[in-house]
Each structure stands twice: as structure tokens, then as C-alpha cells.
Image (cartoon, rainbow, N blue to C red):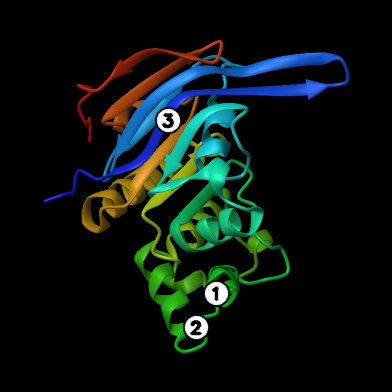
Amino acid sequence: MKSTDVVVSADKVTKVYQTGQVQSRALRGVTLDIQSGEFTAIVGPSGSGKTTLLNLMGALDVATEGTLTVLGSELSALSKRKRSDLRLHSLGFVFQAYNLVPVLTARENVEFVLELQGIKLDRRRRAQAILDQVGLTEFADRRPNQLSGGQQQRVAVARAVASNPRLVLADEPTANLDGENAEMLLELMKDLNQKQDITFVFSTHDPRVVAYARRVLTLVDGRIEADDTKHTLAK
């Protein structure tokens, strides 16, 4: 049974960007809780604040107003070093552009996270086991430019879960994938969610992601306009 721990709690979170004399309000008083084990999509038009909210959850930025607690830590109270430690040890990230290190093989990209964590023993074996899990056993020694887009994104997922995170944040993870590869990626992440109780939160325009999500949050002009908690898993 999945736990009901709150992994993300936002209370009246506002984010304002300042460019010269111009202020841009990306989020406007967002309040929400995300429970452990959720598979949640954040949707909305371009400029609605989806990526901003994901960046705040990922401790990549801090809120201008309000409080945001991730895995029990109130982020604005953490130093940059402690936010970095939180990202390294407890969070995973999947980006639209993959963000793999081009000179490293698939295995080395996964190992890199373990190296940053200070893990020395069995690093290669652990990285290979994760690549096996995402169906890339035969591609471990290939560099990103020798892999298809779908394969690169699966390496990105392997890297994201290498640190055994409780929360994975995925920003438009299927945007560059065709239908078959998007389906494979979503099945992979659903499997990780169900078998390892990893919480996934997506920002997306993709109806394929929405079809898999069990909760859909709709952002419009920086506010949550709808919270479909009864959305059923389609697959």
C-alpha cells in the first residue's frame, strides 16, 4: 500500500520575476498538496506557470511569497547548499531536451549521479542494473548521439531514478517523442511509480501524458483553475 505522506505542500505560493522596471507574476497564490505515490500532470496554456511551479518544487528557484515545503523541508529556509543536497539525494529530474552529458556513455551518465552522491562501491553495477530496468541493456556503452530520442529520454529517466528519489519532476518529457516512444516512456514511468512508489509530477501540453495521469492540475495565469483528483488511469 502506498503511503499518504505529503511530499509537496504549497501555501499561497507566488513567484514574481523582475526584469529592469518590469515585473512578471508567474504564479499567483498557488495552494496545493501532493501525496506520496501520486502520478500528477500540471497542464495549462503557454505562460501559465507550469515550468515555474515545477522549478520551485525542484528547489531550482525560490518563491517570492508564500511557503513551499518539499519532503518536509521548507525551501525558503534552506541555504543554496542544502537545496542542492535535497536535489541530489531526494529529487529526480527529466527534461524535454534530455540534458545528457554528450561525451559520456549511457552508463556513465547514470553513474555520474551516483558519483556526485559519493557512492564508490558497485557504482557501475548499479548503473547497469538501472539501464536494464529501462530496457537499455544493449545500449549502455553508447553515447547520446548514438541513441534515438526515445532511448535518450529513457537514459534520462534512468539517471533521474538512480539516486532512489522520492519525487521525480518531469518537464514536457514527451515533447520530442513520437507516439510509440512516448507510450514506452509513459509505461516505464507508470511502472516505476507503481512498483517503487516514486511520486511523479509532470508539466505538459501532451494529451498522452494527461491520459496516464491520475490527477490533473490546470494552471491558468499562474492560478490553479481546476484540480481533477478523480481522473482515472487510462492504461
Where does label 2 land, which residue?
Answer: 124
Q: Is residue 138 above or below residue 152?
A: below
Residue drawn at point x = 83 percent, y = 22 percent: 19
Q: Between 83 and 170, which is closer to the camera in this rendering?
A: 83
Residue drawn at point x = 39 percent, y = 64 percent: 164
- Camera sees residue 172: no
Q: Is residue 225 above or below residue 68?
A: above
Image quadrant of residue 28?
Answer: top right
Where does label 3 land, which residue?
Answer: 10
Q: Earlier in the sequence, mark 1 or mark 2?
A: 1
Measured in 3D between alpha carbons, the distance from the residue under mark 1 to the one under mark 2, in whole angstroms, is 6 Å
Q: Look at label 1 and name its amino acid.
A: Glu
Where does label 1 land, which residue?
Answer: 111
Image quadrant of residue 88?
Answer: bottom right
Rendering coords of residue 32 (x, y %): 37, 26
Q: Look at label 3 and name its amino acid.
A: Ala
